């Protein structure tokens, strides 16, 4: 029995080590690919001013779709900010997804909206549309407000797609702050590519504590809380390293729901957003890509690393917990819906690299990590722990985690350097040192709970509360 | 297993490996932090040097352009010797010249060109153009085009078909900006399709930078590449080349959908009314894209009568086309000029809309 127990320990040790090594190799490759992609992007875009092109009447028109649910406090300011974007031809469609507060009325009153009796083609099924409103004032002629019964974010976006009149749609969170030239930068890959581009996404930056005036970022500041700063490090890793690398090998499976542009025709052909998943952004892109692969069309998905979109991240642990729980369930739902792709050579990079990566390192990572912790507790319980061995194993995991975060910080430094003060670097280094000890275990726990909730059939989004980018005081959780 | 007291050599391999890896990762972390700070310091230092040099250049260029007592030859020699020893410094000088060039006109721009040559920047840029790095070629082309500096055609021609799209684009812009008579001659030489982005750039240059006579776009209507044909058709309406309407009419039957669409759009923009009866007669056999374009054209230059001519066949169309049709019907009926009594009986039937 004693020998068997030791054998189990040894096998488990090797399994965890092998898993760790595969993850490390993946991260190293992603760092290399990201560096190449970032360097290429900077080379392509560092000498030329494209603002002059904004005069062109031949740039494709864009429909910005922004679902709003109980956004009474910020909706008007956010719409005003969207109205000032620099682009020759765009419409803004705000979809009031059955808000329980005064979001709709406030928007209707402020922008002098009246009911529009035009007909719209419901290419994608949605919950009932109560009305579409347009403004009586010429200044707001590119604004539409859709009032519909509550059906969730995916359903609201589908309603927006049905109402939209333009060939490209840009889906955003209504509370995001966009850079003035965000639309021009995001549409460029669609126009400057030999292949058909079905979607393009951008980097999401964290706006907590930043100074914002008239819907514009005036000064980039580091957030005051550890939680938000830890998410900065996490976003650097995810966007500057992860997505840049996936973009390099054309294996992107996710364009953030907070800011992404899509070819409307392809979206409709793929069936629009899936309202039955909580990870609708990832699911849509995977479905679109799967469809294109199956139709054998030469296509690509683009990624723009410029900081174009700023958003607020959770500053409270319980809100973060809900968000990560939902992200985990969204990942599981998407992977299960498209399980046919995993390890399927027919889907090339997506089938052989991207989907397996998401399976093993996004879905299963918290589970394996959690099992590792359980394994450690069992060893302690049976008095089988050798503390030197533990320290060495812990040291390798911890040192790799901080190395990866520092690499992300370095990439930010050589690319966009949004945090200008030397003090900022020091604070971010400190955050990176603490993040694996405090933040990461919590996110892992939220991931585990997401798995359990998925098994229990939980489908809800979970209410998200935001502090508001114009008001930095915490508000009560809705 | 008690390793506390055993020497490192006696540790199992897996432990040794992990220990060494930990040390490596920690060391790499330290190196990265150092690199990060070095990068920041270096950037700040470069910025400082850049600012200092920019100030010197600012004074120098101002004096060069506007001070009549300024000893140009002597001062240029001194500037080159004292302040422009490396490529880094030359790049800053180039940037300053570009800023001045953008903000000045007439005689001053000619003087900037002279200064560009006296500072030895021409040789530097030509060497950049001949380098293997695509971004250096693209940047060199950008500078030459902005400053309107002519270089031998032999250096430009191969770059029109460079494998990098950015180089091709800059080569095209260079030709457009410097050309005096034949700005689109390169279209006969290109071997890769024009992206929409390039087309927008070309259009922008033709409208805002090119001063000569706009070429007749009909010369590229039989080009091998669809993108060039579509672009030429679009430009005909942008530059009001009404004389090409007869030849353009043939393109509404082109086998490529994109070209048919472009032809309809262009003819519609030029308000060629004879187009509508032909489009209406072909409507039900066309693709969805062309049907939508036809409806748009009817809205733009047609009447309710044209819409009604589409007939009952509209019931067999897909929902998207039907919705556009119904909205168009409402649009015409809501127009103040609409007179239901003046049109025939078919049009007096109830609205198709529910």
Image (cartoon, rainbow, N blue to C red):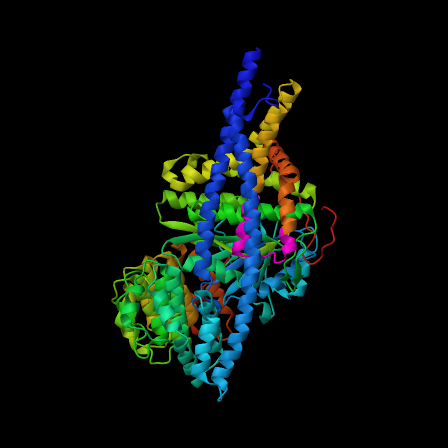
Q: Which residues are magenta?
A: A405-425
Is A250 above or below relative to B332?
A: above
Judged from this view, the residue extending furthest toward the top is A1
Q: Residue at x 55, y 41 (%)?
A: B27
**Residue A140 drawn above or below residue A30:** below
The residue under the point 56% across, 67% down is A141
Q: Is residue B109 visible?
A: yes
Comparing B268 with A4, the one in front is: A4
**Image quadrant assignment for residue A463:** top right
Residue A407 sits inside the magenta stretch? yes
> Where residue A24 appears, x then y in whole percent?
50, 37
Question: In the picture provided, is B212 more to the left or to the right than B37?
Answer: left
Q: How many dots with numbers?
A: 0
Q: Residue at x 55, y 36 (%)?
A: B23
Seen in the picture, residue A287 relative to B294 is either above or below; the reply is above
Instruction: Report the quarter where the N terminus of chain A lies.
Output: top right
- Magenta highlight: main SS: helix
Point out residue A81 in the picture as x, y percentages from the top left corner: 61, 63
Residue sticking out furthest to the bottom: B68
**Nearer the observer, A286 or A359:** A359
Above or below, B247 against A152 in this view is below
Q: Nearer the viewer, residue A277 or A440?
A: A440
Can I make out residue A117 in this image? no
Residue B186: image quadrant is: bottom left
Q: Is residue A50 left or right of residue B47?
A: left
Place of residue A222 in the rendered image (x, y in percent of width and height, measured from the top left):
65, 54
Nearest to the observer: residue A182 or residue B348: A182
Image coordinates for residue B160, horizontal then vertical, percent:
31, 65
Residue B170 falls inside the magenta stretch: no
Taking the spot 35% from the left edge, 69% from the top edge, the residue there is: B126
């Amino acid at each position: 029995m004693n020998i068997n127990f030791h054998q189990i320990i040894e096998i488990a040790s090797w399994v965890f080590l092998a898993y760790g090594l595969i993850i490390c190799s993946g991260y190293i490759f992603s760092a290399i690919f990201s560096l190449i992609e970032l360097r290429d992007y900077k080379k392509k875009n560092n000498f030329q001013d494209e603002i002059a092109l904004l005069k062109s009447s031949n740039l494709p028109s864009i429909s910005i779709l922004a679902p709003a649910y109980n956004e009474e406090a910020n909706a008007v300011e956010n719409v005003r900010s969207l109205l000032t974007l620099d682009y020759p031809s765009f419409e803004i469609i705000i979809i009031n997804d059955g808000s329980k507060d005064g979001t709709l009325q406030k928007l209707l009153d402020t922008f002098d909206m009246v009911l529009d009796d035009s007909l719209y083609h419901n290419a994608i099924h949605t919950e009932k549309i109560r009305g579409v409103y347009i403004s009586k004032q010429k200044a707001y002629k590119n604004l539409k407000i859709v009032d519909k019964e509550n059906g969730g974010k995916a359903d609201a976006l589908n309603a927006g797609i049905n109402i939209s009149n333009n060939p490209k749609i840009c889906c955003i969170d209504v509370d995001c702050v966009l850079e003035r030239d965000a639309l021009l930068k995001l549409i460029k890959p669609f126009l400057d590519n030999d292949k058909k581009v079905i979607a393009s996404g951008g980097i999401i930056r964290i706006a907590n504590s930043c100074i914002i005036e008239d819907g514009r970022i005036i000064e980039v500041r580091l957030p005051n809380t550890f939680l938000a700063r830890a998410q900065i490090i996490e976003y650097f890793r995810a966007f500057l390293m992860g997505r840049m690398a996936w973009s390099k090998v054309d294996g992107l499976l996710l364009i953030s729901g907070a800011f992404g542009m899509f070819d409307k025709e392809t979206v409709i052909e793929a069936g629009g957003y899936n309202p039955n998943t909580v990870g609708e952004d990832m699911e849509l892109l995977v479905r679109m890509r799967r469809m294109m692969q199956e139709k054998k069309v030469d296509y690509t998905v683009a990624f723009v690393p410029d900081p174009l979109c700023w958003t607020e991240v959770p500053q409270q642990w319980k809100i973060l917990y809900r968000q990560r729980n939902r992200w985990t369930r969204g990942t599981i739902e998407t992977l299960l819906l498209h399980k046919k792709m995993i390890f399927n050579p027919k889907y090339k990079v997506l089938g052989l690299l991207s989907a397996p990566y998401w399976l093993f390192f996004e879905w299963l990572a918290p589970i394996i990590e959690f099992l590792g912790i359980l394994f450690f507790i069992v060893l302690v319980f049976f008095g089988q722990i050798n503390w030197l061995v533990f320290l060495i194993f812990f040291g390798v995991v911890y040192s790799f985690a901080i190395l990866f975060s520092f690499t992300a910080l370095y990439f930010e430094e050589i690319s966009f350097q949004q945090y200008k003060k030397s003090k900022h670097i020091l604070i971010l280094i400190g955050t990176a040192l603490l993040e694996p000890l405090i933040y990461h275990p919590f996110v892992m726990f939220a991931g585990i709970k997401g798995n359990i909730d998925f098994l229990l059939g939980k489908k809800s989004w979970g209410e998200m509360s935001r502090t508001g980018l114009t008001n930095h005081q915490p508000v009560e959780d809705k | 297993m008690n390793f506390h007291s055993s020497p490192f050599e006696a540790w199992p391999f897996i432990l040794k490996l992990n220990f060494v890896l930990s040390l490596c990762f920690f060391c790499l972390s330290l190196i990265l932090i150092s690199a990060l700070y070095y990068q920041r310091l270096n950037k700040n230092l470069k910025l400082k040097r850049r600012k200092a040099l920019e100030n010197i250049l600012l004074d120098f260029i101002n004096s060069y352009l506007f001070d009549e007592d300024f000893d140009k030859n002597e001062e240029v020699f001194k500037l080159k010797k004292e302040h422009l020893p490396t490529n880094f410094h030359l790049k800053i000088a180039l940037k300053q010249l570009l800023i001045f060039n953008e903000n000045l006109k007439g005689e001053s721009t000619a003087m900037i060109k002279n200064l560009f040559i006296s500072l030895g920047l021409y040789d530097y840029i030509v060497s950049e153009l001949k380098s293997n790095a695509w971004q250096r070629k693209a940047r060199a082309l950008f500078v030459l085009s902005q400053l309107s500096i002519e270089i031998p055609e032999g250096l430009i021609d191969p770059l029109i078909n460079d494998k990098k799209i950015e180089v091709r684009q800059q080569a095209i812009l260079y030709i457009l900006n410097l050309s005096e008579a034949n700005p689109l001659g390169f279209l006969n030489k290109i071997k890769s399709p024009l992206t929409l982005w390039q087309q927008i750039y070309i259009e922008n240059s033709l409208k805002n930078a090119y001063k000569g006579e706009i070429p007749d776009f009909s010369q590229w209507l039989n080009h091998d590449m669809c993108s060039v044909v579509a672009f030429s058709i679009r430009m005909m309406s942008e530059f009001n080349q009404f004389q090409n309407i007869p030849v353009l009419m043939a393109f509404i039957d082109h086998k490529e959908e994109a070209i048919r669409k472009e032809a309809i759009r262009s003819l519609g923009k030029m308000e060629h009314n004879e187009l509508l009866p032909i489009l209406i007669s072909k409507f039900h056999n066309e693709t969805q894209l062309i049907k939508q374009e036809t409806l748009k054209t009817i809205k733009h230059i047609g009447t309710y009568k044209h819409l009604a001519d589409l007939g009952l066949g509209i019931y067999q169309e897909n929902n998207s086309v039907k919705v556009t049709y119904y909205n168009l019907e409402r649009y015409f009926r809501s127009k103040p000029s609409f007179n239901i009594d003046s049109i025939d009986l078919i049009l007096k039937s109830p609205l198709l809309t529910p």
